[in-house]
Image (cartoon, rainbow, N blue to C red):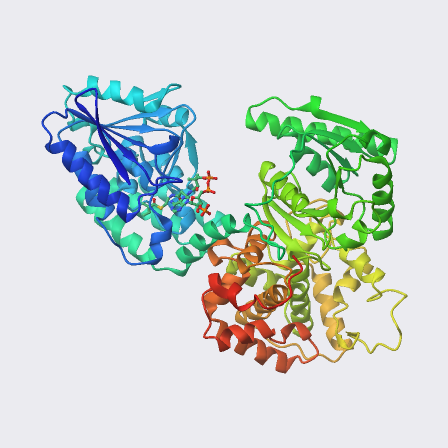
Amino acid sequence: MARYELVKRSVALITLTNPPVNALSSAVRHAMAKSMEQALNDPKVTAVVICGENGRFCGGADIREFAGPLRGPPLVPLLDAIEAGEKPVVAAIEGVALGGGFELALVCHYCIAHFKARLGLPEVTLGILPAAGGTQRLPRLIGIPAALELITTGRHISAQEALKLGIVDQVTEQNACEVAVEFALRAVAKPLSSRRVSMLTTPCPPDLDALLEVVTMEVKKKARGVMAPLACIQAVRAAATMPYSKGIKRESELMATLFNSGQARALQYCFFAQRTAGKWTLPSGAQWNNSKPREIRSAAIIGLGTMGRGIVVSLARVGISVIAVESEKKLLETGKQMVIGMLERDAKRRGVSASLNLLKFTLSLQDLKDVDLVIEAVFEDMALKKRVFQELSKVCRPATLLCTNTSGLDVDALAGVTDRPHLVVGMHFFSPAHVMKLLEVVCGPRSSSETIATAMSLGKRMGKVSVAVGNCPGFVGNRMLKPYMDQATFLLEEGATPEQIDKALEDFGFAMGVFRMSDLAGLDVGWRIRKESGLTGPDVDPKNPPRRRHGRRYCPIPDMVCEQGRFGQKTGRGWYMYDKPGGTNAKPDPLIQNLLEMYRSRYAIQPRNISDQEIIERCLFALANEGFRILEDGIAARPEDIDVIYLFGYGFPRHRGGPMFYASMVGLERVLERLEHYHQAHPDVPHLEPSPLLKKLVACGSPSVQTWREHIKTMHSHL
Ligand SMILES: C/C=C(\C)C(=O)SCCNC(=O)CCNC(=O)[C@H](O)C(C)(C)COP(=O)(O)OP(=O)(O)OC[C@H]1O[C@@H](n2cnc3c(N)ncnc32)[C@H](O)[C@@H]1OP(=O)(O)O
């Protein structure tokens, strides 16, 4: 857990040894305390160097231990003792110094960082604050504004930035540990008092209150309803207004409030859920750690619409050669200019040169014969996609992987028209594809484990959070969206307004309510799909009673909005009105209000006052209920996968953990009871009928979300 060695006859080298990130578990803290005591008591030792094994200094406290009671020596007194010691201590930072790891570096009297090292206080992203003195020492060292920015955002900084800020003393391209040992030998005779950061006076700006007010407003706007950044601001204020001994107590009080909050549990769940999602498993036994992905050096994208362009950029910026194909010269030229512009802007932002030499643009599928992988991103039309796949099957060499970026069509039906169904997989990107982090990897029943592994690993290489899902209409994300959106439109019928529903969802924490989100995405896409499936338009069976389709409740208001040419932001009108087509400033539109009133009077619906609680319960419990069905159907392997999809693809608030975690926090019994209540009131809405899995989990005593999987294993999996 910590190795103790004497080097150069007088330097105690303490190496943290807790793979993979040398987290400060109770055992590590215990070993560190012992090693420090040994170093400080040994007269041969004149200086100490602390480093981490395998080129990683320290990833902070062991987050897995947060769930249990504190064991082993607490961190704050341990760090205070290191700082107060009479022998110089030098931190040798390689890899990462995060959270408690950074706080450890702050108590060392000197810091040497490798030029590739990253430092940061990401506690805020876990719903807590840097409670091992970080909120008290960092402002003393670098001033209030810079410390506030780092602590409230959790941003990682480079070694170079840390040097500029005065956090580290030297940046090296050599072995940081060896450099630190030499540095320590030179530091032996020097006085330490000015190197004890807790003893420094915080440089305090004259307008402290105004500054804190501005940051508070910014934080409230960016992270609505999130507690941790606000507590961070209060802790930093203590660093400016109190001596260290009192400030550290304030830090600890604020931490206690956060630590026990549901938000901290949710955010820590998200941390592990994201990592769990990469660990896909198929019923065949093939899984993330026994299936080798193929190496992808070249790829082709068919279709240079919004999605295709984003995918080209995502591939090219990680060094993959891309051939982009369009069907017409004009579309090809427009797409080409857009892609080049996007890549140039992206490269400028990242301070690198744009990889334009990796791109080729063509009108001919014949040019794709040698590529390793193709991603089809044409219009969402099954017949068209089938034609493309048939063509690709003829043109590409037999080993080429064929992927589709469909957002919900049957991946296996596409596989069926090719000569290589085992090499066909869905890669469902989210728009804009070069920005959004989510990738649903859709496993068809015939996709081979190597194909899935390749798509998952390619997603990771592109910086995406990839989640393996089964093949069904809408997969996971879009399948769950339907009951959620249906509830929102039913609530409109019953008396709510788009702005009321959006406000309730935004107060809950969504970046955008359902109607603002639909306006941004465009209302015409869903309208076309509803027309094609006979739910609206001339093909509707006239025998359908109004507001019913296939025996279920159906709300035609979205169709009526589209019939007026209101397709959302792009047309300047949708559920809201905008200053101009493409405008983003949504204002309530009296015409929508009129439309709703006329609609209600036409169908003799008496509008009623609808509470925010009802809006949240109906929208979010219907969403989670579909999630339970998805787990039953084996379309997602674990609740964590569903939550990750909603966090990264649909703007679900991270501090709520995702729809499935949220349901578990509310209490499954309560969710079941509310669904039963709403289903009784709306028996013609099957999505409100509690799923068998939800009932089963409640009957089993509502186990924790991490163990739900054990209750589903007898059911059939589509993965
Ligand atoms: C009070 C609170 C205090 C004092 C704190 O310190 S709170 C913790 C603050 N630290 C962090 O938030 C850092 C969290 N970790 C990371 O950001 C990243 O893991 C990393 C940048 C350190 C490394 O990234 P990467 O190389 O991509 O590796 P993974 O993220 O996949 O992680 C590998 C496995 O290590 C587990 N892990 C990482 N950090 C911790 C940690 N602090 N405690 C416990 N476990 C940690 C992570 O879950 C991965 O495990 P597996 O999923 O593979 O089992």
Front-most of residues 39 and 694: 39
Against 64, is 212 above or below?
A: above
Please indicate whether residue 374 sits to the left or right of residue 250 in the image: right
User: Is the C terminus in the top left, top right, bottom left or bottom right quadrant?
Assistant: bottom right
Q: In percent of the image, x 65 and y 37: which residue is there?
A: 294
Please indicate whether residue 449 sits to the left or right of residue 97 in the image: right
Q: Residue furthest bottom?
A: 680
Total number of numbered discs in the rendering:
0
Front-most of residues 263 and 100: 100
Front-most of residues 695 and 577: 695
Residue 265, x across and y down, in percent: 41, 57
Residue 176, x across and y down, in percent: 34, 23
User: Is the N terminus in the top left, top right, bottom left or bottom right quadrant?
Assistant: top left
Against 708, is 443 above or below?
A: above
Residue 556, x across and y down, in percent: 77, 68
Q: Say if residue 659 shows up in the picture.
A: yes
Against 511, is 38 above or below?
A: above
Please indicate whether residue 552 sits to the left or right of residue 160 in the image: right
Please indicate whether residue 509 sits to the left or right of residue 68 in the image: right
Q: Say if residue 139 shows up in the picture.
A: no
Q: Quadrant of ligand 1?
A: top left
Residue 89, x across and y down, in percent: 21, 28
Q: Quadrant of residue 615?
A: bottom right
Q: In percent of the image, x 80 and y 74: which residue is there?
A: 550
